[in-house]
Amino acid sequence: MSVTSSLRKQPYSSGVAWLAACILAALASSCSAQSTGLPVGWKEAQPPAEQIRDGNNLACANYSRHEWKVISDPSGLQVLDEGGKSRETPVFPSHFVLSKEMRGRAVTLKTSDGWLVGFDAGEFGGGLWWSSDDGRTTKRLLEENVHALVTRNGIDLVLTGLAHMDSDDGAIYAYHPGEAGASGTMLRVADLNSSPGAASLSEDGTLFVVTHKSILRYGTNGELEPLYTNGAFGALYPNSIVPLKNGRLFVGMRFYVLELIPEEHNLYSARWFVTSECRSMTVRGFDCVCTAGKGR
């Protein structure tokens, strides 16, 4: 029913009141959409099912070629499609030579006593090596898959884990530098209980981690707190997490972007987003595409 035809059937005063209510509702909806912090082009969607079943939305999203990555820059929160893109090659020490055990995705970190170099080849293994500044001397420190290397308040943290078949585990280690050109030591400081997909530091030094099961907060006091758990993460491969100054968290993953909003009593509410043209989804040609709207 159009606004004009509706007004014709009501007294003038009630028609004006009804129109004013419509305008206020539209403004509220607009403000709600803008309050997410996401760029234009995203809309809230029903949360995905937590388990893959034939024909459900999680089964479709698992096929998607879109890998949404969230980043924060001076212009605000950005969402990039990393699907199909090759990963950037990290910087290695100048004379570092790869051995046959060093395979898979690599991450590196300059430390006070040299370098940390980590590898993750999934079920085919991984590991962490210490390297001298020039790369000529190396030593293996861990035989675990390394996903991220982060320096917090002068302490180098190593996030490890593997999710394969019925196994899903993860941990955080602290690296303590060595002396006189020798490698340092590793100390396991937290159990993630699931393989990490991404990690990010907030301005106050809090480390936020998204795993195949949960989003966790690792405080500077050494406490690890779960903030949100969803069984869908394992099929959506979270790849990035961004904490904002207002306390909100954004997580990028396959097909979806997730927003966590802080509430009272250390709780968070979750909002799931898809691109705004997506009305429904279906698997087509080994891809999850949006239907009843513009294709993705």
Image: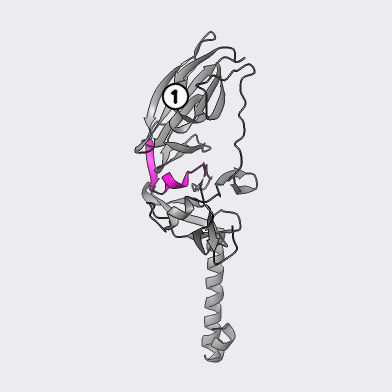
The spot of residue 132 in percent (x, y) is 57, 14
The spot of residue 253 in percent (x, y) is 51, 47
Label 1 sits on residue: 174
Question: Considering only vertical position in the picture, is 45 above or below 223?
Answer: below
Can you tell which quarter of the image residue 15 is in? bottom right
Please identify the residue farthest to the left as the structure is shown: 166
Q: Nearer the viewer, residue 115 or 30?
A: 115
In reply to whether residue 235 is colored magenta, the answer given is: yes
The spot of residue 162 in percent (x, y) is 41, 33
Tell me: 176 left or right of 84. Answer: left
Give the residue displayed 59% in from the left and 86% down from the top: 4
Asked whether the viewer can see residue 152, the reply is: no
Tell me: 264 left or right of 129. Answer: left
Question: Considering only vertical position in the picture, is 129 above or below 28?
Answer: above
Can you tell which quarter of the image residue 12 is in? bottom right
Please identify the residue farthest to the top as the structure is shown: 180
Magenta segment: 224-245
Give the residue displayed 52% in from the left and 64% down from the top: 279
Tell me: 218 left or right of 35. Answer: left
The spot of residue 48 in percent (x, y) is 43, 55
Q: Nearer the viewer, residue 268 or 274?
A: 274
Asked whether the viewer can see residue 166, the reply is: yes
> Would you call the spot at circle 1 few (<14 residues within 10 Å), some (14-19), or many (20 or more)?
many
Please identify the residue farthest to the front as the structure is shown: 285
In reply to whether residue 70 is colored magenta, the answer given is: no
Give the residue displayed 53% in from the left and 82% down from the top: 17
Q: Nearer the viewer, residue 244 or 49?
A: 49
